[in-house]
Amino acid sequence: MSKPPSYWNKARRYLSSKDRVMKTLIEKYSDASLTTRKNIFLSLCKSIIGQQISVAAANSVFLKFKKKCKNKISPKIIQKLTFTQLKSCGLSRQKVKGIKSLAEKMLNKEFKPNLIKNMSDEQAIEYLSELRQIGRWSAEMILLFTYNRSNIWPVQDIGLLRAISNNYKKKYLPPNNFVEKLKIRFSPYCSVATWYLWRSIDDEPIQY
């Protein structure tokens, strides 16, 4: 894990001045911050594992996956593991195929993570979405947690939508126009706002 992003404290001040709910959350959850693993392969694997299952279920599968890799999650290790070995961790067939494909593309240099740093958020989402099992939500998680992009607002994320409903006293799902209004209010620090909203519904800071 690493230090918070360079913009973190500036973003906290900015969001506190823009929104009363955000000010309350920032004061309440000052004990932690967004960090990064700086390991895109690990983050992509974790993102694939976490799709469409609860955080608790994802953590359980990930621990088995990590153990199967003997704590060394890398494209070469994944390449050596069989389909059956990976599936035994609790992964679906599609998720195994996604992780196997990712390992292959990283080994043959078909996927080049270094290109992402020079892309806009939308360009990077498009590039990441070319990978098997990686859609917009997964790509946004990578930009937020691996690259610490400052203005990611993942409107497909159930946790974010639930947190908006809880904190702003809206029905679930919150109206699209309200979610868009918050995006405008929180820009250019939507990632930080997202992190605090997540934190309000989960005791443990989220990490992909």
Image (cartoon, helix red, strand yellow):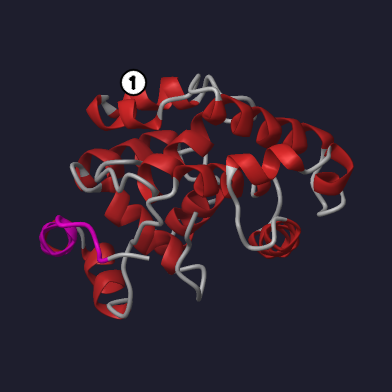
From the viewer's perspective, tell me whether residue 196 is left or right of residue 187: right
Q: Position of residue 43 (x, y in %)?
A: 51, 48
Q: Which residue: 38% across, 65% down?
A: 1
Q: Is residue 10 above or below residue 134?
A: below
Specify few, some or many for label 1: CA neighbours under 10 Å numbering under 14, 14-19, or 20 or more.
few
Badge 1 amino acid: Gln
Q: Is residue 54 visible?
A: yes
Q: Is residue 146 magenta?
A: no
Q: Look at mark 1 in the image and give the residue it sits on.
A: 123
Q: Which residue: 70% across, 33% down?
A: 100
The part of the image, by quadrant, that contains residue 167 is: bottom left
The one nearer the camera, 20 or 74, is 74
From the viewer's perspective, tell me whether residue 125 is left or right of residue 43: left
Residues shaded magenta: 3-15
Q: Position of residue 91 (x, y in %)?
A: 79, 46
Q: Which residue: 60% across, 40% down?
A: 75
Q: Position of residue 198 (x, y in %)?
A: 44, 61
Most common secondary structure along the magenta stretch: helix
From the viewer's perspective, tell me whether residue 15 is left or right of residue 158: left
The one nearer the camera, 120 or 15, is 120
Q: Is residue 154 visible?
A: no
